[in-house]
Image (cartoon, rainbow, N blue to C red):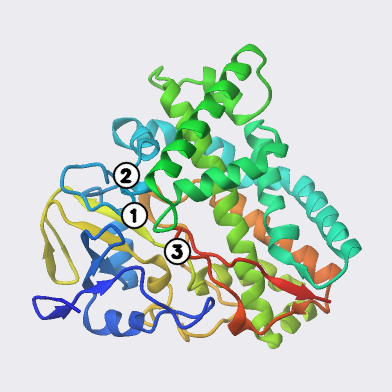
Amino acid sequence: MSYDNGAPVRAYPLAAPSALEAPEDWRELRAGCPVAPVTLPSGDRASLLTRYDDVKQVLSDPRCTRQLDAEGAARISADASGGVFNSSMAESLNGAGQQRWRRMLTKWFTAKRMNALRPAIEAMAEQLVDDMVEHGHPADLKASVGFPLPVWVICDLLGVPETDRDRFSRWSDMLLNLTRYGQREIDTAQRDFHAYLAGHLELKRTDPGEDLLSSLITATDADGGRLTDDQLAATGQALLIAGHETTANMIGKMMALLLADRRRWEQLVADRSLVRTAVEEALRFDANAGFGMPRYVKEDIEVAGTVLARGTTLVCSMAAANRDDEVFAGAEGMSLDRSPNPHLAFGAGPHSCLGQALARTELQVVLDVLIRRLPTLELAVPAGELRRIEGLVVGGLHDVPVRW
């Protein structure tokens, strides 16, 4: 291991004992090295933040930007492009037009709109559970419910055919590459995904629907500005990736966490009013959250008593921050009734996750339906044998085998 000013330089992402457990380094870093030098899969150097206050500060600071295509910014992944944070898709949605983009999309992801969608999401969840039960157990909860539900929701929202979901999943995995795919595969996925969405947008121009992309084609902001064709295609890509990949993985991880300790599941079965706070606690407690959020420092800043020079790339580990016992009492354990729960799973500040109301709705619906329909649900393998997804910037489980 190399050293930087006496601090060991760790390979990032950090290793964890198992798919549901936190890296042992988190506690040590929060206590003694809150700005830790790390080497990314690309080989480039960055600084890792693990304390709650530091992560929240950086995510909210306009001097810490998403411009990972800036000169000198660290490349994230092992492929030549540097990964999704350095990609043309990210470039299209960052910069001067980023706030316009957020303003134009925000109305599609309000809590009010999500409440209106809830009955349809519940009906779909019920149907998926019916199908899983009909096929019998053991079953893969992720493949049966966790993946198809958010795919159906986001496809409906964007007006794209749900029958193309396998293509979206394949393209998403390649664009979320960390170490799994080569540059040729990634370039092909990017080209095919962009071409697919460009064709879809042309169809929407001639035959618009009630969906988000149809609306964005003609929408203007308060200044009369419109999204460019590249921004429209990048929006479709970003929403299809984030709208199914992250939520599908979170459904699987949430259920695995709740079933890993039988007392948690039995507490929920006995009191379904805990669903909302249990979802928030699963989001906080998730140690397998993936890469985290990188930021590029465009002006010198001070974090945790350390001056970080312009040009530094930071990695904000929201998952590590969510285990900070300076903020969360009993942070290393799950409290299904924890309230308030100011976790950072969806980020913080002006770039916090646009789709968090949708994700919360889907997670709450799935959990409520499964508690009601399958109170005897349990993992079909020991929790320690669950397999972590490797090589992508998102965290998740390969499968979640269950029986009932």
Vertical relation: 391 (above or below) 69: below
Which quadrant holds residue 90?
Answer: top left
Q: Amino acid at mark 3?
A: Gly
Name the residue rendered at 27%, 67% in the picture: 48
Secondary element under disc 2, as helix, strand or loop, is: loop
Q: Which residue carries the number 2 mark?
A: 81
Q: Is residue 59 left or right of residue 158?
A: left
Q: In the image, 126: left or right of 55?
A: right
- The residue singled out by tag 3 in the image is 290
Residue 353 image point, x, y percent = 47, 50
Quadrant (top left/top right/bottom left/bottom right) for the C terminus: bottom right
Q: Residue at x 42, y 25 (%)?
A: 230
Q: Is residue 363 left or right of residue 294?
A: right
Label 1 residue SS: loop
Instruction: Classify the position of the N terminus by image quarter.
Output: bottom left
* Circle 1 crowding by C-alpha within 10 Å: few under 14, some 14–19, many from 20: many
- Residue at x 51%, y 32% (from the top left corner): 192
Looking at the image, residue 373 sits to the left or right of residue 160; the answer is right
| Residue 233, label in figure | none
Instruction: Name the spot of residue 27 as percent of width and height, x first.
Output: 34, 84
Q: Tell which of 78 and 222 is nearer to you.
A: 78
Q: Is residue 292 above or below residue 230?
A: below
- Which residue is denoted by mark 1 in the rendering? 77
Q: Secondary structure at mark 3?
A: loop
In the image, farthest residue toward the top: 206
